[in-house]
Amino acid sequence: ASSLPSLGDEVKTCNLSFTKVGTWGMKDSGSEAEVKVHVMINGQWKYQDQREYHFSLDNGSTALGSTYQNMPISDTDRIVVYFEETDTFGSNDWTKTKSYGGMCSMRNCGQWGLECKPINNMDFRATWSDMWGRVYVHAQNDT
């Protein structure tokens, strides 16, 4: 079975924004996290501003720049967010989220499936290697 839409089917589109980057329980040699955010869509690097975002290691977060706002996507797009933790004293560490698709049609139907609402905010999460905490971007879309 093909995942491509049939002729005549309209693929839903929307704008996706990553509003902030943050972490839980991260361990590092410094007092704060320094993280770069890279967005891959359908296997190609699409959005990255090369800025280091600084925030506290445990439960810290900071707003992302305009590069990550109102990114046009469609339901057929596969989105993966890569995080690069910059390290002054050694090599940079990388992690990534799982691949997300169908972002414009995603619905949250609650426990009983009675009230289905568009998912217009969620976190894309990843875990750093060696279990030293998690990192995320907060996403919103205009569906």
Image (cartoon, rainbow, N blue to C red):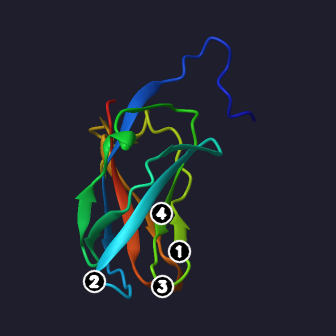
Residue 53 position (above or below residue 43): below
* Residue 143 appears in view: yes
The C terminus appears in which quarter of the rendering? top left
Residue 121 position (above or below residue 12): below
Instruction: Return the residue at label 3.
Output: 89
Q: Residues within 10 Å of mark 3 (few under 14, many from 20)?
A: few
Instruction: Return the residue at label 2.
Output: 31
* Front position in the image: 138 or 83: 83
* Front position in the image: 58 or 50: 50
Instruction: Return the residue at label 1.
Output: 92
Q: Circles 4 and 3: CB distance less than 8 Å?
A: no
In-image side of 74 versus 110 (left or right) = right
The amino acid at mark 2 is Ser
* Front position in the image: 89 or 129: 89
| Mark toward the viewer: 2 or 4 | 2
The amino acid at mark 3 is Phe
